[in-house]
Amino acid sequence: MPMRLSGLMSGMDTESIISQLVEAKKTKVTKAVKAQKTLKYKQDAWKPLNTQIKNFYLKTLSNMRYEGSFVKKTTKVSNSSIVSVITGESAMNGVQSLKVNQLARSGYLTGGKMELIPGAEKRDENGEIISDKVTADTKLSELGFDLSGSTGTINVQSADGLTPIKVDGSTTVGSFVSALKSAGLNANFDAANERIYVTSKGSGAANEFEITAGDSSGRAALEKLGLSYGTGAENSIASKKEKLFKSLKELADSDSGLEADLKNKKLEVKDSSGNSHEVSVYDFLADQASISPQWTVDDIDDSDILTIVRDVQIYANDNKASISGDLNTKLDAWVEDAVDVVKDMRRFAETKKTAAADAEIELNGATYTSTSNSFNINGLTLTVNSTTAPGEEVTITTQDDTDGIYDMIKNFFKEYNTMINQMDKLYNADSAKGYEPLTDEEKEAMSDSAIEEWENKIKESILRKDSSLGTISSTLKTLMMEPVEVDGKKMYLSSFGIGTLNYFTAPENEKNAYHIDGDSDDAETSGNADKLKTMIANDPDTVVKFFTGLANKVFDEVGKVMEGDEYSSMYSVYDDKKMQEEYDDYTVKIKELEKKLADYEDKWYAKFAAMETALAKMQSNASAVTSLLGG
């Protein structure tokens, strides 16, 4: 904005004079701005109301046009702790019996506890052990997997297919768990328990998984990871025990003292018939080394082996001076091997594999299976939560849901009443004559609360006697009062105990709202006889035919109002396109008027500036003359 210095020569307050001259011209701008604001208020009032009408038309009315929407059924079960039921439209009425034989489950593998080998513990700078726990960073070599740098293969069979995993001494617990996840399983390392847990991603037999060794190195890795299970693992343990017994027999045969000592130690074993016998350790070893052993090796558990280990250690310590150094070394090595085998045995015993399984139920004697605990059968969705006890049956009863039909009709009128009451409130609003949108200058002279009160007065009355509002409101009211023909008979809402309240006693702007006789939530009509519920129970077909007929009639007529044309958009009951066009026109017009006003103001400033210039020249000339005359 240019800086203007006026009235210097004339002494006149040109700013005030020009301001008064411009004020008269400014009226046109002010009127245009206020008209645009009024239009904006009207647009803002229509948008939420139109959305309400549109939703009522496209959702509520559209849904109620079809008899299928009224087909409501409900199902009750005699034991909801065993099964829950969702009732579909196609469900058949009747009573059914259910047995739940088995729930669906995922395959689950609980790993045995892993252990660090001596020397793999974390130590401080003084060599003191600060942690002997297995972590995600623990390497397989630190668990005892040491095959001179060889690589093992572990095969994972999941729903995703077969995935081989390569492992070696540098493979960490964490990286192996990640490999299991990549192979299509859920896997987790629990540092607190030092175990790996594995489960299939989905339930059911189709999602079963297996983790097996691809070679001997893979088997060794699984044993150290605590994930060795099944027949292969059992055979591996048996083979290690047999090798252990064979090597001890060879050591005893090379040393008479050890042989005599082992002959004095006793074991309780079983024969192939399951009969128990007490035999010496040496006789047991000799039996296992024979071609046809009579004692069962499976019955020698970890505690039996540890007992033998202690006996061997005692013998070696007691006779260290009399036996050869080579034998001492071999006995120490045997003890280490035996302890390692015991650890593998214990990990194997701790490793538990639960097989995945399908859910199985019997419905009315027919057997069904599912990979999940959910079954979709003849319109019912059954979700089983637990199995039934032997001889127990759950009764499932499906029947028409009269409450569902009633609630649908009740919700229809609840939405209709909210909408029609709002229309009446807006249409019958008090006049705001004398109130116009405020200019910025007018707001400066008022408090915030006064401004808010003033503007609310305009907004609340902006749709008063609006022709578009009157049209849609009258259309709805008329249609709701008209009859619907059902099987050749004209019926009205009053035929079902539904009507408006007395015109003179109904609350303001709620005179066109409908109330259902006997509705417990309606204080006005709750004491009346519930005619609607009675008709739904006794003659649901007539109820459904009437309300689908009413909904179709209202849908068609309201649809005509919302068709859209050159003034209004599709699904709009007011001239939204025309209003927006007018609003945009005002924006252009206001800019033009503001420019003209600025030009007018500049013209007057130019005229006064010229006058000041002329006065300055006159004064200058007068001074010159006075100077010449000796003044």
Image: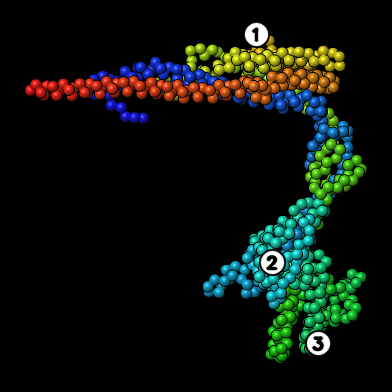
Horizontal and vertical percent position of residue 404: 78, 27
Q: Amino acid at mark 3?
A: Asp
Residue 91 seen in the current view: yes
Horizontal and vertical percent position of residue 12: 26, 19
Label 3's element? helix
Q: CA distance from mark 3 to mark 1?
A: 118 Å
Which quadrant is home to the C terminus? Answer: top left
On the image, numbered disc 1 is attached to which residue?
504
Image position of 548 with respect to 78: above or below:
above
On the image, numbered disc 3 is attached to which residue?
253
Q: CA distance from mark 3 to mark 2?
A: 35 Å
Image position of 64 with respect to 294: above or below:
above
Name which residue lies at 69% across and 24% down: 56
Label 1's element? loop
The residue carrying pointer 3 sits among few (fewer than 14), some (14 to 19) or many (20 or more) residues within 10 Å by Cα, namely some
Horizontal and vertical percent position of residue 446: 41, 21
Horizontally, is 271 left or right of 597 in the view?
A: right
Residue closest to the eye, 94 or 278: 94
The residue carrying pointer 2 sits among few (fewer than 14), some (14 to 19) or many (20 or more) residues within 10 Å by Cα, namely many
Name which residue lies at 76% across and 25% down: 64
On the image, numbered disc 2 is attached to which residue?
114
Name which residue lies at 71% across and 90% down: 324
Report the mark closest to the observer, 3 or 2: 2
Horizontal and vertical percent position of residue 269: 85, 74
Q: Are marks 3 and 1 in contact (CB under 8 Å)?
A: no
The residue carrying pointer 1 sits among few (fewer than 14), some (14 to 19) or many (20 or more) residues within 10 Å by Cα, namely few
Q: CA distance from mark 2 to mark 1?
A: 85 Å
State which quadrant residue 53 falls in.
top right
Q: Are marks 3 and 2 in contact (CB under 8 Å)?
A: no
Residue closest to the eye, 467 or 621: 621
Horizontally, is 46 left or right of 202 in the view?
A: left
